[in-house]
Amino acid sequence: MTYQPTIRSPRRTAPPQTPWALFVQQTLLPWSRLVRVANLFTVFGDPLAGFLLAALLLGSGINPWRLIAVAISSVFLYAFGTIQNDWCDLTEDSRHRPERPLPSKQITPAAAALGALVCAAVALFFALLLGRWPFFVALFILALVTAYNVRLKKTLGPGSLCMGLCRGANVLLGAACVGFPFGLFPLVIAETIYITTVTWLADGENRVQIPHANVYYLPLSFAIGALVSLPFLPGDSYSTDSWLSFVCLVMALIVTFGLAAALHNRTTRPERMRAAIGLSIRALIPWQAGWIALYGTEGAQSLAIIVLTGLVFSSVLGRRISIS
């Protein structure tokens, strides 16, 4: 009997990854998850809205470089908060969310701590370039964020309010570059209440829940904030040139009211609640764009459209990278 030799196909091995692919997989994606990159597109619109609304109410001009600087400061303040949040929650995340960058050892705690310090330094540097008051507001935001991450996040009421104050102060960060007109504060209070409500709802995102009437604080904060602001606005703000501002603000109201109606008194599973939280955070983008466009110039309207494009980037990235 003769035996035919077995012909074995050569073992297939994966092609070696390029340096760029390794950088994306080992560095870019873990850090993007750590800073919740999808949420960054909802952040810089706050100080831009505060800056332009304060300038509108005070009749001030706009320096584009100051707008860029305050947006950068805001983004790095947010990144500081998200990194510090995961650093403080390392023990808990090791049990409940082992896929996060720190528990999975994609990023070391020491690297995360250094990253948070760098973000804080960059944020304060750009705030200091803008002047004394923006620097003080940035310090106040850092204090609020640290208080939330270290202590207050364990208590629902104070923690939710602290997070709301962080967003309200983010609006003040932009206004601090110009001044603090009284007509600015309906916007600040509205955003504080809005994010306080979002944080309250997000506390139960990992369990089945039935949201009650407080979910309607989302559209009500927007609606009341806009209505209370009306008497403070200059007369030419009501012209047909303000159509983009009107469309954006109405869009934010429709989205938040529809979201509240979909959740109110309905059994909501965790995956649906997490999607709702993501939508409620992204609803800030048209709200911010509306106040930016209200300034009325072509530049302000172009800036509002740029901010609106963040809806696309935030939605696409949010499908791949967790927002919480």
Image: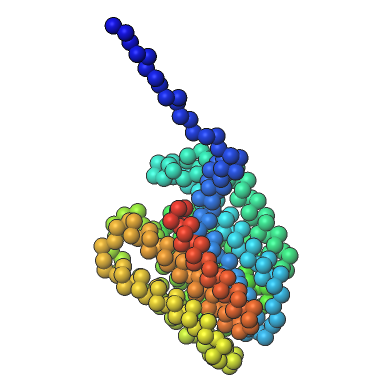
What residue is rendered at 53% in x and 66% in y? 310
Picture quarter with the N terminus: top left
The quarter of the picture where residue 212 lies is bottom left
Locate residue 83, reporting x and y percent. Answer: 55, 51
Locate residue 42, reporting x and y percent. Answer: 52, 65
For the question of whether residue 267 can be seen, the reply is yes
Locate residue 120, reporting x and y percent. Answer: 64, 55
Instruction: Indicate whether 249 appears above or below 269.
Output: below
In the displayed orientation, state which residue is furthest to the top. Answer: 1
User: Does 174 sit left or right of 94 as displayed?
Assistant: right
Picture quarter with the C terminus: bottom left
Foreground: 272 or 241?
A: 241
What residue is rendered at 35% in x and 60% in y? 273
Foreground: 74 or 204?
A: 74
For the question of whether residue 201 can be seen, the reply is no
The quarter of the picture where residue 9 lies is top left
Locate residue 96, reporting x and y percent. Answer: 39, 44
Instruction: Indicate whether 100 appears above or below 58.
Output: above
Colouring scheme, one of rainbow, by chain, secondary structure, one colour: rainbow
Instruction: Indicate whether 61 appears above or below 318.
Output: below
User: Does 259 sit left or right of 22 as displayed?
Assistant: left
Instruction: Indicate whether 81 appears above or below 17.
Output: below
Number of marks in the image? Answer: 0
What residue is rendered at 62% in x and 69% in y? 173
What residue is rendered at 40% in x and 21% in y? 8
The quarter of the picture where residue 171 lies is bottom right
Foreground: 298 or 122?
A: 298
User: Does 189 sit left or right of 77 as displayed?
Assistant: left
